[in-house]
Amino acid sequence: MVKIRVFIPHLELKEIFEDVVRKLPQYKNIQIETIYVFGTPEALAQNEDADVLVARGMTYDTLKKLFPDKHVIEIHVSSFDIFDALVQCRKQHAKKIALCLHKKKFHCMEELEELCGASISLYDAQDQKTTETSIQKALEDGADIFVGAGTMCGICDRMGLKWVHIHTNYDAVEVAMLEAVNAARTINQERAKTVIIKEMLNHSEEGVLAVNGRGQILNINNQAYRIFQLSTVDSVEGKTLQELDHSKEWAELIDGSGRRDRILKINGTSYYVQFKPLSDGTSEAGALMFIRNADRIIEEEQKIRKGLSEKGLTAKYSFKDILGKSQAIRENIQMAERYSRVNSNVLIVGETGTGKELFAHSIHQASSRRDQPFVALNCAALPENLLESELFGYEAGAFSGAAKGGKIGLFELAHKGTIFLDEIGEIPITLQAKLLRVLQEKEIRRIGSTSVHPIDVRVVSATNINIEEKIKEGQFRSDLYYRLNLLDITIPPLRERKEDIQELVDFYLTRFACEMGKPIPSLTPDAAHLLAQHSWPGNVRELRNVCERLIVLNDSDVISTGLLRQLKIFRESSIEEPSLNLVEETSDDSVYSRLKPKKKKKELAKELGVSRTTLWRMAKRQSELERREK
């Protein structure tokens, strides 16, 4: 409830004031009181309970000084009100008029004197005491009538002097009261907001403290009481943080010379404390302190990561998952690592199966956005109408069949993170303009929406086609291409880095053998030669599939050319099998000598420090994960 107190300066005005109050809009949470006050008594200081004060003249000035933090509203006296009072003096045949006012000056005194037919002298009336002094001085000057406000009129009554009261017109009272009601409504709204904020803070799991520049506590929420194990009977306002907890690091936080966040021990428990200054660069205006249980943060982070992982919004691979020791692949990895340190868009070019997606995942994983979402989409997998709604989302009822509550798009899901657009060369020409606008303006508009949403997303795209040729054919926008191709990586096909085949074959044979619970086989020299000389049109993906089939078909510890010839891709191979003499004459640096026999499962388990059963279970879990990824 907000209380408005109105001070009536003279009983003659009581009816006007009460009529204005009666006609005001009525609000349940606003109470209006009227009170008659003569002069500026000491009792004015007892109005602390009122929220809004309405007064005139010297009463207003006194209240303003007594309550500088309250809403004190002035009922203004206009020059016309004063002229009306002066005209009344002429009717009483006054010869010398004493005009008792405060802070009023007139530049047309001669005209006023002519109008009134009397001389006019101004006297200061700040409060009751100065008004009495002014009246006495005016009497000495020969004044025969006095013009002023209610306080002056009351003093003149006691002294038996003639007086004219300066009336306040109805409109002035109405304006002041409407201003008072609006101020009361604003106070109610602010109080409601304060209650809501206080309730929010008290229901927060964070401890929140407001401190001034000296580290003294201004406010504290319920959770902070629990963290510091304080009694709710005790008031901590005005105390320093060091009085609650004796750690020296509180002073360092408030000082602002060191880090603005740190882990502190409070009553034996670790808390993550953040210091947020309320002014730029200095702590003089104070700060907010946020205190969170460190164990709870770790637990929540794990839940978030798990949730994102279940939605497929995390990167699964890093640079260590990219196999190969060739100069070409090493240079690609080094370049990608440099790209991951910035936020520029990246275009990855390479044939099907070369590992473009691995590079995209790895760039995100090594970037500053690693803890944010990683969203992947194959642009060739969806028709145009579905692709647009997937990328940008849609509002409820945007089209027939739209979800009831609308749908958030992949760009919004990737906010603060990375979006990977695979097969970007297949995106329809009609969508390219919209995608270009997203990249330029960094904002998206959902289908069926009239508003835009700002986004902060890094775009990593990939293609296995020559986009420059598509630009010449008019099937791809050149401006979009240059937006996507700020940084580029070209992954060479496997046939151009045959020195990596050994490592890849070794890795996949070992992996699939462990998953299927079979012995890890070794390659005969001629089988190794056949694999090394194959052109691998499907690149690493094809090699992986071949290795999996070899493990499925093989029942011995050795893989020979006979088993390879059972696979379609090797049946019509024109490569001649090497003779025994050729193999024996091959130097140690040849590809045959580098393809060494693989380790047995028993040896691998011993090297990893686990049992063969545990190794088998690990392999089985990995297999299930990969099947879900497909």
Image (spheres, rainbow, N blue to C red):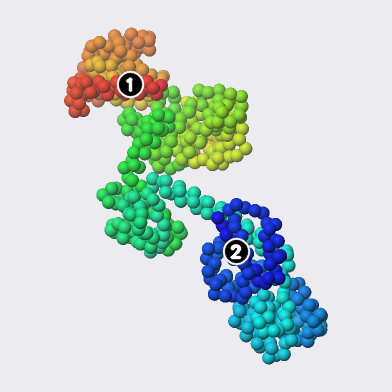
Type of amino acid under label 2: Arg
Write down the residue under mark 2: 5
In the rendered image, residue 133, in percent from the top left (x then y), is placed at 62, 85
Who's the residue at 81% across and 84% down the image?
A: 93
Who's the residue at 25% across and 10% down the image?
A: 555
Q: Quadrant of residue 452?
A: top right
* Observer-nearest of 286 and 216: 216
* Observer-nearest of 550 and 194: 194
In the rendered image, residue 620, in percent from the top left (x then y), is placed at 29, 20
- Give the side of residue 216 with respect to residue 57, left or right: left
Q: Which of the image's four quarters has the C terminus?
A: top left
Write down the residue under mark 1: 623
Residue 351 in view: yes
Does residue 331 lie above or below 517 as drawn?
below
Type of amino acid under label 1: Ser
Q: Which of the image's four quarters has the N terminus?
A: bottom right
User: Can you tell which mark lies on residue 127?
Assistant: none
* Secondary structure under the numbered disc 1 in the rendered image: helix
Who's the residue at 61% across and 62% down the image?
A: 33
- Give the side of residue 276 with respect to residue 30, left or right: left
**Contact, CB < 8 Å: mark 1 with mark 2?**
no
* Label 2 neighbour load within 10 Å: few <14, some 14-19, many 20+: many
* Observer-nearest of 227 and 318: 227
* Secondary structure under the numbered disc 2 in the rendered image: strand
